Amino acid sequence: MDRWTLQMGYPVITISKNQSEQLPTHYITVSQEHFLYGQEVRRNNSLQWQVPLTVAVGNASAVCLESLIWINNKTEFHGIGQMGDNTWLLGNINQTGYFRVNYDLQNWKLLIQQLHTKPQVISVGNRAGLIDDAFNLARAGYLPQGVPLQLIGYLPEETSFLPWHAASRALYQLDKLLDRTEEYRLFSDYVLKQVASRYHQMGWPTNGAHPEGNVLQASYQTEELQRELIMLACSFGNKQCHRQAVAYISDWISSNKNRIPPNIRDIVYCTGVSLMDEDVWEFIWMKFHSSNAVSEKKILLEALTCSDNTFLLNRLLNLSLTSDLVPEQDVIDVIIHVGRNPQGRNLAWRYFREKWDVLNLCCFIHPSSSSIFDSDVSNSDAPIGSAG
C-alpha cells in the first residue's frame, strides 16, 4: 500500500487493443503514469503504482467478459479474450479503483457509439465514470476536447442522477473558461440541447399550488436529478426555466409567502436576481436582514452576488466589509461568489487587491479562502467514485 498512501496523487491507466503483429489479437497494452493537469510537469514523472485493474470486453448488446489484472510496471501486455473490430474495452468497472482510465481513440469512438445506441449495456456507475474521466482527461491534455462533448450527446436518454452529475460539474468548469469568448453561444446551445428533453420531462418540485404549469410531484429518488437538471437549464439560459424562476420570485413578493421548494431555493433566488430588476435585489437583501435561519441567510447572500448589475455587485462588496449584517466569516464568500459571476470577476479582483490589508486582518481564518477566484463548483480533480 505504500505507493498509494505515501506517494502523492493517483495514476491514469491507458488501455489499448494490441497493435503489434507479434502478439495475438486477444492481448491488450496497459500503461500507467501519474495523472497531472500540467503537461510540462508530466515530462519528468517517474511514479508508479500497483494497480488492481478490472477490465471488461463488450459489444453492442452485452458485456461479455470481465477480468482482474494487476499492473506493476509502466507498460504491460495482458491476455484478455478474443476481440473483434467492434468490441470495446472498459476499465475500472463500477469505479472501484482510485485512478482514471484512458483508451485509444478508436475505443473511445466505440464507447461513444455504444452510449448513443444502447447506453444501458454499460452500468450507471461506468457511464458516470466515462463522462468524468473523459472531461478530466481532456482538461489535462490527454484527449481532444471533442471526445467528452461527443460522449455526452447521449444524455437526453439518460435517466440516472450520477451521469448527469458527472457531466454538470465538468460543464460548469468549461462554462467559466468559455463565458467571455465568441464561441460561448455554440457551447451553451449545445448544453441546452442535451438538457431540454429530460428537463421538461422531469418538471419542477412543488409545495402544492403553484403559479406556473408543468410542475410535477417528484419522488425522493428523483429529487437530486430534478435539481441537477433545473440548475443546468437555468444556468445555461433555458427560457422556460427562467420563466418558472421569475414566477416563483414574483409570487413570493406579491403574497409575502415563500412557496419555493427548499431544495431549489438557491437556484431560483440566483436566477431571479440575475434576470429581474433592482427591486428584486432589494427584496432579497431585505429578506437576508430579517431571516434568522443561518442556512437561509447563506443562500440569500449568495443570491445577491448573481446580479448582472455591476453597481449592485460593487455595493454588495462594500457592504460585506462595512455592514454589521454580513458576518465577518462570510466576507470572503461574498468576494468568491462575486468573482464567479462573469459581470463581477474584475470587480472582485480589484476589490480584493484594494482591501487586502483589511481582509488579511479580519477574514482569512476561513476554509474557503484558498479557493478565491477558483471556477470549480466542486472537487472535480478526484475520480468520481471517490468524490462525493
Image (cartoon, rainbow, N blue to C red):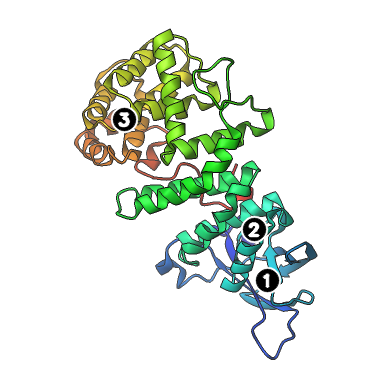
Q: Position of residue 275 (x, y in %)?
A: 34, 29
Tell me if mark 2 has few (under 14), some (14-19) or many (20+) residues whose alpha carbon lies within 10 angstroms of its own. Answer: many
Q: Amino acid at mark 1?
A: Asn
State the residue position of label 2.
Answer: 115
Question: Closest to the observer: 303 or 67?
Answer: 303
Q: Is residue 363 above or below residue 100?
A: above
Secondary structure type for disc 3 = loop
Q: Position of residue 268 (x, y in %)?
A: 45, 26
Secondary structure type for disc 2 = helix
Could you tell whether 221 is left or right of 356 in the image? right
Q: Position of residue 276 (x, y in %)?
A: 33, 25
Tell me if mark 3 has few (under 14), some (14-19) or many (20+) residues whose alpha carbon lies within 10 angstroms of its own. Answer: many
State the residue position of label 1.
Answer: 72
Name the residue: 40% across, 22% down: 300
State the residue position of label 3.
Answer: 307
Residue 331 seen anywhere in this rendered image of the structure: no
Secondary structure type for disc 1 = loop
Q: Amino acid at mark 2?
A: Leu
Q: Earlier in the sequence, mark 1 or mark 2?
A: 1
Question: Can you tell which of label 1 and label 2 is closer to the viewer?
Answer: 2
Name the residue: 33% across, 38% down: 341
For the image shown, how many numbered marks are present on the structure? Answer: 3
